[in-house]
Image (tube, coloured by chain):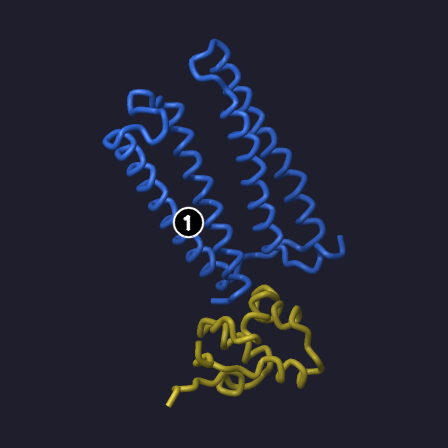
Chain colours: A yellow, B blue
């Protein structure tokens, strides 16, 4: 299996935001902590709605949180 | 208790479901295979086993799932849970298809190639067929739970 097409900076952004916990981010994005863990680990690519919620929780634009690798 | 609190509510519930499947199956089929078909007490004994299995399932569910929801906080399903549910239900459905096909093949082969086991179609009583179908349902439910567990661990 290759590298995931969608990468993210959720972990770094959490630490930049006063070491926000996964549980705090999960509560802000209205998902479970397991979903945040899966997103951080690159095991799950969130829906557009959830991606926006996460970006909103950090107060940054979507592309600062998620990046698309086109594989070329 | 501390070890259990390291697992998520969802994961513990799946494990609980798997163990319930195993316990009820073991109790039910262990009892059923010891019955003598055609005996006077068969129906009463079978009813006793079914009632016992239901009681075990109810008591187990109250104790185990209640305990899980006390140890870990119950969580509302989110989008990842729903996708995992859809995938695991699909796997369970495929497994049920396969098991039903295998049972049909077994019955046909058993009849056409001479008895593989000493039961002919005429001896396939509704009770026996119901047990085969029950086994199929339990097996597909187990596949569904295992698939959920796998998807939670591996990611989707």
- Residue B72 placement (x, y as % from top left): 68, 54
Q: Residue at x 42, y 30 (%)?
A: B131
Mark 1: few/some/many CA within 10 Å (<14, 14-19, 20+): many
Read off the residue under disc 1: B92
B83 vs B126: above or below: below
Chain letter for mark 1, please.
B
Q: Residue at x 76, y 56 (%)?
A: B2
The residue most toward the bottom is: A72
The residue most toward the right is: B2
The number of numbered discs placed on residues in the rendered structure image is 1
Residue situated in front as seen by the camera: A1 or A26: A1
- Residue B134 placement (x, y as % from top left): 43, 34
Residue situated in front as seen by the camera: B84 or B30: B30
The residue most toward the top is: B40
Q: Quadrant of residue B52?
A: top right
Q: Quadrant of residue B67?
A: top right
- Residue B57 placement (x, y as % from top left): 58, 34
Residue situated in front as seen by the camera: B102 or A14: B102
Q: Residue at x 59, y 64 (%)?
A: A32
B3 vs A33: above or below: above
Element under disc 1: helix
Q: Residue at x 52, y 66 (%)?
A: B154
Left or right, A5 with reference to A60:
left
- Residue B26 placement (x, y as % from top left): 56, 34
């Amino acid at each position: 299996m290759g590298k995931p097409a969608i990468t993210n900076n959720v972990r770094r952004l959490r630490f930049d935001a006063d070491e926000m916990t996964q549980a705090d981010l999960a509560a802000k994005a209205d998902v479970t902590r397991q979903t945040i863990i899966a997103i951080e680990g690159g095991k799950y690519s969130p829906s557009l709605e959830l991606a926006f919620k996460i970006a909103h929780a950090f107060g940054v634009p979507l592309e600062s949180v998620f990046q698309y690798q086109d594989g070329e | 208790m501390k070890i259990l609190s390291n697992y998520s509510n969802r994961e513990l519930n799946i494990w609980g479901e798997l163990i319930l499947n195993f316990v009820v199956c073991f109790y039910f089929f262990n009892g059923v295979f010891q019955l003598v078909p055609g005996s006077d007490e068969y129906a009463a004994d079978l009813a006793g086993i079914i009632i016992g299995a239901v009681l075990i399932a109810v008591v187990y569910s109250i104790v185990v799932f209640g305990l899980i929801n006390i140890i870990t906080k119950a969580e509302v399903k989110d989008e990842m849970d729903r996708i995992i549910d859809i995938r695991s239900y699909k796997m369970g459905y495929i497994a049920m298809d396969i098991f039903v096909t295998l049972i049909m093949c077994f019955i046909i082969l058993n009849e056409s190639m001479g008895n593989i086991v000493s039961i002919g179609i005429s001896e396939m009583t509704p009770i026996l067929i119901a047990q085969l179908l029950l086994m199929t349902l339990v097996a597909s439910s187990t596949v569904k739970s295992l698939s959920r567990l796998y998807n939670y661990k591996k990611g989707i």
